[in-house]
């Protein structure tokens, strides 16, 4: 739909009164700023983009989005420079003041996207202002408007420059269609991480140390650093560990290019890189017992939070003896495989419980996005005393009972925990 000239908006009551040119320009500017303030108050703002810099320089554009930071409404401002990007999260009032100062003095062009409209304010070099509106959703298109409302709830913005380096967006910060599912996975992971962090205690307040094993191309590693450092305002030290040197080089280059301090990538795996202490351990799609090595590393390093997505369950299935009652059901190979996965991950969750974690197993993302959709999330408890000892003992009894029922002789994570029992928390002996 073509933009609607300011003078043609009589149906919506949008026509400005005929006034001298200078006053009319001022009224358009003030109207645009009021629309921004109203969209924030009504929670209909999707984003604001200030572009076309007034003077040639390093600053190219500023993007603003609504953000709730520790329960307080903020206006997240992403300052795009030629060589780096800076995120600031002022309060709504301070953010509106900054936009007011930038509009016209630093930028000639402003685009305001709400759930129903796109407003465009153009400022000429002589100060002449034009305000236009384009409707994005008519009343009958409520479903589309709801979709825009959901989009603004995402934890990450498509304008983040590192997404271009990773191939998620193109040069115009538009989502690459083939990456739509990956984009949903990234945001879902950040959502899970954000909620889980609210209930745990970090080793040092304000500082968080993260290791992502099997980082691959770094989608989740970059997203984790971005959210922790800018979304939550923490001093984030995030390390991606990956076996492939080309991926490590690619990710380190992107992190340096975008000025993402505290983010690094190392060549190795869960057996070769064993941190003495960390706050968050991530291991998604670690194959077979690599998941157990990752969980063990997280436990021994005292991780406050463990996020693991298991893959390729091979160790337990050959050991399983079919209980007579279940034999008619498990005689089918597909059912036996599913049961082996359930037993393997249930034992992992119970072993985490026995080590002082609250563990849960749930569907990470819908099956339509990936078949590897299970996540084990474990948050370290702060409890101590007889009640905590009894809870851990009960979990160990359940492990023994479950193994006996299925005839399981050995579980990799349990074996490693027994081998390192009594080892000081900051000394790891994974071999």
Image (cartoon, helix red, strand yellow):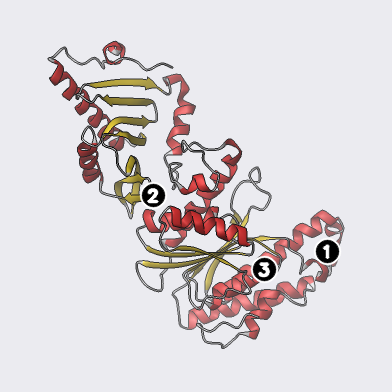
Graded by Cα atoms within 10 Å as few (under 14), some (14 to 19) or many (20 or more), the crowding at tag 3 reads many
Q: Which of the marked residues, 1 or 3, is nearer the chain's N terminus?
A: 3
Of callouts 2 and 1, the N-terminal one: 2
Question: Tag 2: Cα neighbours inside 10 Å, few (<14), some, or many (≥20)?
Answer: few
> Number of marks in the image?
3
Q: Which is closer to the viewer, label 2 or label 1?
A: 2
- CA gap between label 1 and label 3 equals 32 Å
Badge 3 element: helix
Quarter of the figure with the N terminus: top left
Q: For the point 24% across and 37% down, which residue is it?
A: 106
Q: Is residue 192 visible?
A: no
Q: Badge 2 is on which residue?
A: 83
Q: Nearer the viewer, residue 119 or 140?
A: 119
- Determine whether the residue tagged by mark 2 lies in a helix, strand or loop: loop
Q: What numbered label is drawn on residue 30? A: none
- Residue 308 locus on image (x, y percent): 59, 62
Residue with the mark numbered 3: 290
Q: Position of residue 196 (x, y in %)?
A: 47, 60
Q: CA distance from mark 2 to mark 1?
A: 65 Å
> Which is nearer the N-term, disc 2 or disc 3?
2
**Does residue 336 appear in the picture of this structure?**
yes
Q: Are marks 2 and 3 in contact (CB under 8 Å)?
A: no
Q: Are marks 1 and 3 in contact (CB under 8 Å)?
A: no
Image vertical order of residue 382 relative to residue 178, above or below: below
Please give left or right for residue 263 compared with residue 106 in the image.
Answer: right
Instruction: Provide the secondary structure element on which disc 1 rests.
Output: helix
In the drawing, what numbered circle is on residue 325? 1
Q: Is residue 24 above or below residue 41?
A: above
């Amino acid at each position: 739909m073509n933009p609607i000239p300011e003078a043609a908006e009589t149906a919506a009551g949008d026509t400005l009164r005929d006034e001298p040119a200078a006053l009319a320009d001022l009224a358009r500017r003030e109207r645009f700023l009021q629309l921004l303030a109203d969209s924030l108050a009504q929670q209909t703002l999707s984003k604001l983009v200030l572009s076309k810099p007034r003077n040639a320089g390093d600053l190219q554009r500023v993007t603003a989005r609504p953000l709730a930071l520790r329960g307080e409404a903020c206006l997240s401002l992403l300052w795009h420079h030629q060589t780096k990007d800076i995120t600031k999260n002022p309060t709504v009032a301070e953010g509106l003041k900054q936009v007011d100062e930038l509009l016209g003095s630093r930028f000639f062009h402003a685009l305001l996207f709400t759930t129903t409209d796109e407003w465009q304010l153009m400022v000429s070099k002589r100060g002449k202002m034009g305000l236009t509106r384009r409707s994005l959703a008519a009343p009958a298109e409520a479903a589309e408007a709801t979709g825009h409302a959901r989009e603004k709830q995402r934890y990450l913005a498509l304008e983040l420059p590192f997404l271009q380096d990773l191939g998620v967006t193109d040069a115009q910060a538009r989502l690459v269609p083939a990456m739509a599912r990956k984009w949903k996975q990234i945001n879902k992971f950040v959502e899970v991480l954000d909620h889980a962090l609210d209930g745990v205690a970090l080793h040092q307040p304000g500082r968080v140390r993260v290791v992502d094993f099997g980082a691959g191309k770094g989608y989740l590693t970059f997203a984790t650093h971005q959210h922790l450092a800018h979304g939550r305002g923490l001093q984030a030290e995030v390390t991606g560990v990956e076996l492939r040197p080309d991926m490590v080089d690619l990710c380190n280059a992107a992190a340096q290019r975008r000025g993402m301090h505290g983010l690094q990538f190392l060549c190795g795996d869960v057996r070769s890189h064993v941190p003495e202490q960390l706050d968050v351990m991530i291991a998604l799609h670690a194959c077979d017992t690599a998941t157990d090595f990752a969980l063990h590393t997280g436990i021994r390093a005292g991780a406050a939070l463990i996020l693991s997505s298991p893959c390729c369950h091979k160790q337990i299935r050959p050991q399983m003896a079919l209980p007579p009652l279940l034999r008619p059901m498990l005689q089918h190979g597909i059912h036996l495989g599913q049961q082996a996965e359930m037993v393997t991950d249930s034992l992992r969750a119970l072993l985490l419980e026995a080590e002082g974690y609250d563990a849960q197993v749930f569907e990470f993302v819908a099956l339509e996005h990936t078949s590897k959709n299970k996540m084990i999330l474990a948050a370290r408890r702060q409890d101590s005393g007889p009640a905590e000892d009894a809870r851990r003992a009960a979990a160990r009894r359940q492990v023994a009972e479950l193994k006996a029922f299925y005839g399981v002789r050995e579980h990799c994570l349990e074996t490693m925990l027994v081998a390192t029992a009594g080892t000081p928390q900051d000394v790891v002996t994974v071999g």
